[in-house]
Amino acid sequence: MPEQQTVSKSVLFVCLGNICRSPAAEGVLKHLLHQRGLAGSIRVESAGTSGYHLGDLPDRRMRAAAKKRGMVLESRARSVSSQDLRDFDLIVAMDRDNYRELLRLASGPNTKIRLLSDFLDESWPREVPDPYYGGDEGFEHVLDMLEAACPELLDELQNGAAC
């Protein structure tokens, strides 16, 4: 029987509706944790700054794009709460609008709140674009960004630098 991992850190990914970017980020990081033999060692969730899609699965197009990469996205959309700001070690916003909304919820600066692009080099955009109103290539691009950022994010979490 494999050894049970102890949860030592936690990360919450946040976008607007919690049906495209943030559940994809949750899935990418969970997939990476599994690949590195660290499944269950870090609590990973996602949420939205709006309640437009409460209880919904991730967008079918994002689920399909993730499935092609060997990932299953099965979380249900929920809204971020002030309790999340206390409970999670790291809160990662997909874009500046959601970053500002998280700061508002936190009532000011909060070092736990970061942009996903903080974990990407300068060749990537500063914001993860919302693929909802575009074509399939937008979902693929978002997954490319998330797959580039999550190893750096995980390294920072493990080394304590991100929290």
Image: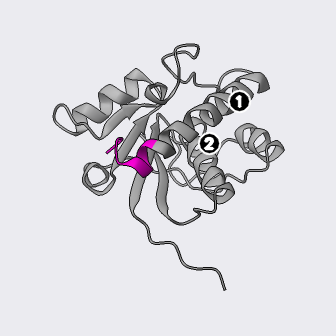
Find out whether residue 76 is within the magenta segment.
no
Tell me the quarter of the picture where residue 90 sits: top left
Q: Is residue 160 above or below residue 130?
A: below
Seen in the image, is 90 located left or right of residue 108?
right
Q: Position of residue 62 (x, y in %)?
A: 71, 39
Seen in the image, is 81 located left or right of residue 21?
left
| Label 2 CA crowd tier, 10 Å (few <14, some 14–19, many 20+) | many
Question: In this orientation, which residue lies closer to the viewer: 44 or 6?
Answer: 6
Q: Position of residue 21 (x, y in %)?
A: 57, 35
Which image quarter is the C terminus in?
A: top left
The residue under label 2 is 24
- Which residue is farthest right? 68
Q: Which residues are magenta?
A: 156-163
Amino acid at dot 1: Phe
| Label 1 CA crowd tier, 10 Å (few <14, some 14–19, many 20+) | many
The reply to whether discs 2 and 1 touch (Cβ–Cβ < 8 Å) is yes
- Which residue is farthest left? 107
Amino acid at dot 2: Ala
Q: Is residue 79 visible?
A: no
Per the image, label 1 sits on a secondary structure element best described as: helix
Q: Residue at x 57, y 45 (%)?
A: 23
Q: Residue at x 71, y 30 (%)?
A: 139
The residue under label 1 is 139
- Which residue is farthest bottom? 1
